[in-house]
Amino acid sequence: MDPETSVPTCYRHPDRQTRLSCTSCERPICTECMTQASVGQRCPDCAKPSAPVMDAAEAQRRANRSPFTKGVIGVAAAVYVVTVFGGPAGDLVFQLGSQYNPAIADGQWWRPITAMFLHSPAFLLHIVFNMLLLWILGRPIEREVGSAAFAALYFGAGLGGAAAYFFLAGDTPAVGASGAVFGLFGAWLAAGLRNRGNLQGQMLLRQIGPLVILNVVISFTPGIAWQAHFGGLLAGFLIAWLWGRLDPRDRRSRVGIGATVAAVSMAAILLL
């Protein structure tokens, strides 16, 4: 064999002879195609960033997002600061934003919504417990179903609790995200019951069941709006139970179900 023809050629430039090779795939490469690396030289293909690794990292980053949960916590915290340190302005925010049923009956329709972001200025643990439960229970749901569907669930449960308080309670003003948070308990309970035939569902029921029972008992503590708790629990359970009958990829219908429960609850408050 002619010594000249025995020299390999670059796999990207067949007209160029080379004695270099990629240290990763061992294909021959010319100096133009070579990329120097810490472990030798690489060909252009092996020198590219690993697309599957980058895709997995991006998928994980997106999976860790929970913008709605963080947004609600941020708004609730900001409103709490205003009501505590805002003086007369803070008092006005609290007075106009609480769920005061006679005022709602007179046309102040926004109160069932704004009350979900208000918490008792005199009781720090009120907002701490609600936001902690939202953080723990809400983020996994938001990551699973998406922010839009989770927002529909949250407002559907919150307004379901507001409707229950409107029809079952008296004239005492009420504030807090408890109805919406109890809706998250209901959603987890529905998921556990729906999957009770497998190990995952059974474990979920063992974890969430005692928490639901404990919080239901706490709901009857004086000064707590048990009506909103039960209304939110039932609304969240209903929404998640209906979600379980959908194709897991059908996020639009999930949003529609939550929005429908929210709209029906609001319409009941304002029209009945």
Image (cartoon, rainbow, N blue to C red):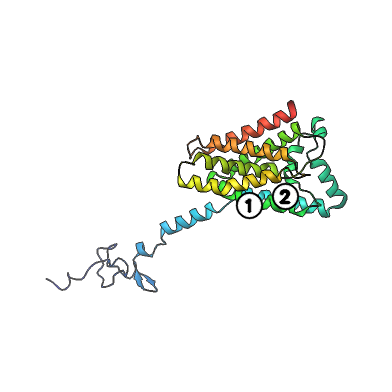
Looking at the image, is 37 positioned above or below residue 149? below
- Residue drawn where x is 56% and y is 46% of the image: 141
Q: Is residue 82 visible?
A: yes
**Left or right of residue 242, residue 122 in this image:** right
**Left or right of residue 249, residue 78 in this image:** right
Q: Nearer the viewer, residue 100 or 14?
A: 100
Residue picked out by circle 1: 135
Residue 119 position in % (x across, y down) = 76, 48
Residue 217 position in % (x across, y down) = 69, 44
Residue picked out by circle 2: 76
Estimate how packed mark 2 is, as few (under 14), some (14 to 19) or many (20 or more) residues with alpha carbons within 10 Å: many
Residue 61 position in % (x across, y down) = 52, 55
| Residue furthest to the right | 88
Q: Nearer the viewer, residue 29 or 133?
A: 133
User: How far is mark 1 from mark 2, CA to CA?
Assistant: 13 Å
Q: Is residue 142 visible?
A: no
Between tags 1 and 2, which lies in front?
Answer: 1
**Left or right of residue 195, residue 260 in this image:** right
- Residue drawn where x is 55% and y is 34% of the image: 242
* Count of number-bearing discs: 2
Residue 208 position in % (x across, y down) = 58, 47
Estimate how packed mark 1 is, as few (under 14), some (14 to 19) or many (20 or more) residues with alpha carbons within 10 Å: some
Q: The C terminus appears in which quarter of the rendering?
A: top right
The amino acid type of the residue labelled 2 equals: Ala
- Residue drawn where x is 38% and y is 72% of the image: 36
The amino acid type of the residue labelled 1 equals: Trp
Looking at the image, is 37 positioned above or below residue 64? below
